[in-house]
Amino acid sequence: MHSTPETPHLTRALGVRDVALFMVTAGCSVQWATSAAAAGPSSLLVWVFGGLAMFLPLSVCVVFLSSRYPDEGGLYVWSKRAFGPFAGFMTGWTYWTSNLPFLTSLLYFAAGSALFWSGHRDTTVSASPTYFICFSIAALGVAVALNVRGLASAKWLNSAGAIARWLETIVLVVLGLAIWRRFGMATPITRQTIVPGLRLTDTIFWATIAFAWTGPEAASFMGGEIRDPRRTVPRALAIAAPMIAGIYILSTASVLVSIAPEQTSALYGLMEAISSDAARLNLLWLIPLAAVFVVLDRLGSVGVWLGAVARIPFVAGLDCHLPRSFARLHPRHGSPTVAIWTQAVVIAAFAILGQAGTSVRGAYTVVVEMMVVATMLPFVPLFGAAIKLSAGAPVPGEVRIPGGRHTVVVMATIGLATTLGAMAIAFVPSPDEHHPAIAVLKVAGMTLTLLLAGAAIYLVGNARARRSR
C-alpha cells in the first residue's frame, strides 16, 4: 500500500499496555477451553504441542513482518508485498469473511452465559432462538457504537474483556482447586489419560486447537493506529503470550476437574462448570458474578475482532478493490465507519439465519464448523510471505530476530505445515456424521464459493479502478 494525498490519516491511540490486552482478548478464548475439556485430559498436552507448532511460529513471523512492514492492514499488506495485489486481496478476503461467523459464535456464547445471571442452573433449558438473536444484535450494537467512536473508546471494552477473562479464569481455577481438595477430580488426570490418542475424533480436535492458537496477527491490522508499532508489537506479544497459554491450560484443567468430558457442552460448558462447583461449595452468589465476567469477556472479543478485521476492507478500499467508500473515515472519530457497519450487518444476518430450522446448540455448531478451513487459509500466504520477505535487506528500526532469516524460515515452515495439516483434518467428517460424503462436499463447496466470490469482487474492483483513471 502506498500513500496518496487522498489517503486518510489514522490516529495512533494504542500503546504497549493497550496492545498487550488487545492480544490477550484476541489471542485466546475460554470457549475453546471447554471444547478442549470435552476431548478429555489429553487436550492438556495437545495445547502445549499446538502452542509450539502454531502460536510460536506465528508469533515469530508476526513480530518479524510487523517490524519490517508496520503498515495498516497486516497480513493483507504482507501478502501483497510478497505475492502481488491479487494474493494480498484474497488473503484479506478469506481472513475477513472467516471472522464473520466466528463473531457470531462469540455472541451466541455470550448469550448462553448470560442465562446464568439469575443464579439458576436450569435456565438454559428454556432458552429460545429469539432470545439468542435479540441478545446477539444488542451486544453487537454496543461493540459497533464503541468502534465507530474510534479505538480511543473501543480499547476500553477490549481491555475490560481481557481483565474479565483473567477474573473468570481465576474464579474457575480457585473453584476447581476447592472441588479437587474436597471431592476429588471428575476426570482422572493420569499418565495414561493425558497421552493424546490417534483416533479420528482426536485428530479432528487438533484442527480446532491449531485455530485456537491464532490471534497474534490481529493487532497488525491496526499498525497505523499503534504508537511506534515496530517496538510496541513485540513487547506487547511478549507480555501477552504467557497470559494466553496460562488461560488456555488452566481453564481446561479446571473444567476437567469439575465436569466429566462427556457432560461438557461447547456452548454452556464454562458456566456449567462454574455453576456446578459453586453449588457444591454452597457459593451460589458466585454464579451471576462469573456470568458477568464471561459475558464481558466475550463482548470484549467481539469488540476486538470487529475493529481489527474492519481494517481489511478499509485497506482494500484504499487499493480500489472495494468501493472507495470503505476507505472513508468518520469525520470526527477517524474510524472506518462503512467497513464496521458492513460487518455488523453481515454478522447480524448470520445470527438470524444461523437459527433458521435448527436448535440453539445446532446453530452454534454450524457457525463454528464454518470457520475452520476458511480461517486457516490466509495463514498459508502469511507464512509464505515471511519466508519470501525475510530474504530482503533489513530496514532501519527493525527488531532483530535471534538467528535472523534462518529462524524466520524454520518457524514459517513449521507454521505452514501445521496450517496445511489443520486444513486437511478439517475436511475429515466427524465419526458420528450420518452422511460423511455430503459433509465433505459441504465444507469443500463453502470454501470454493468463498474463493470464487473473492476473485469475482477483485476483478470487479480492478475494472472499476481502470474506468476511474
Image (tube, rainbow, N blue to C red):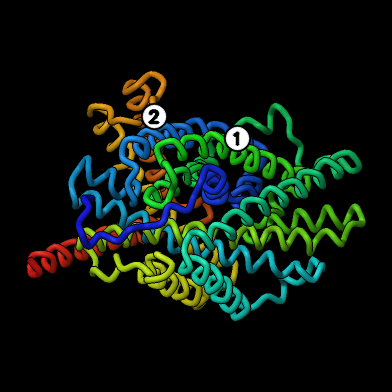
Residue at 33% x, 51% y: name it: 73
Under mark 1, the amino acid is Pro
Pick the residue in front: 50 or 183: 50
Label 1: state its secondary structure: helix
Instruction: State the image coordinates of residue 25 (x, y, percent, origin top left).
Output: 56, 51
Q: Label 2, on which residue?
A: 399
N-term-proximal mark, 2 vs 1: 1
Q: Quadrant of residue 138?
A: bottom right
Residue at the image position 64 percent from the left and 78 percent from the top: 128
Q: Which mark is residue 193?
A: none
User: In the figure, 353 relative to 43: above or below?
Assistant: below
Question: What kind of element bears circle 2?
Answer: loop
In the image: residue 46, left or right of residue 291: left
User: The residue under label 2 is which amino acid type?
Assistant: Val
Q: Where is residue 427 drawn, in percent x and y?
A: 39, 50
Q: How many marks?
A: 2
Q: Is residue 339 above or below residue 265?
A: below
Query: Residue at point 28% right, 27% down?
Result: 394
Q: Tell me residue 133's x, y (percent).
A: 56, 77
Residue occupying the point 38% across, 45% down: 423
Q: Residues within 10 Å of mark 1 (few under 14, many from 20)?
A: few
Q: How far apart are marks 2 and 1 (CA)?
A: 20 Å
Q: x, y percentage for residue 239?
A: 57, 36
Identify the residue position indicated by label 1 in the image: 242
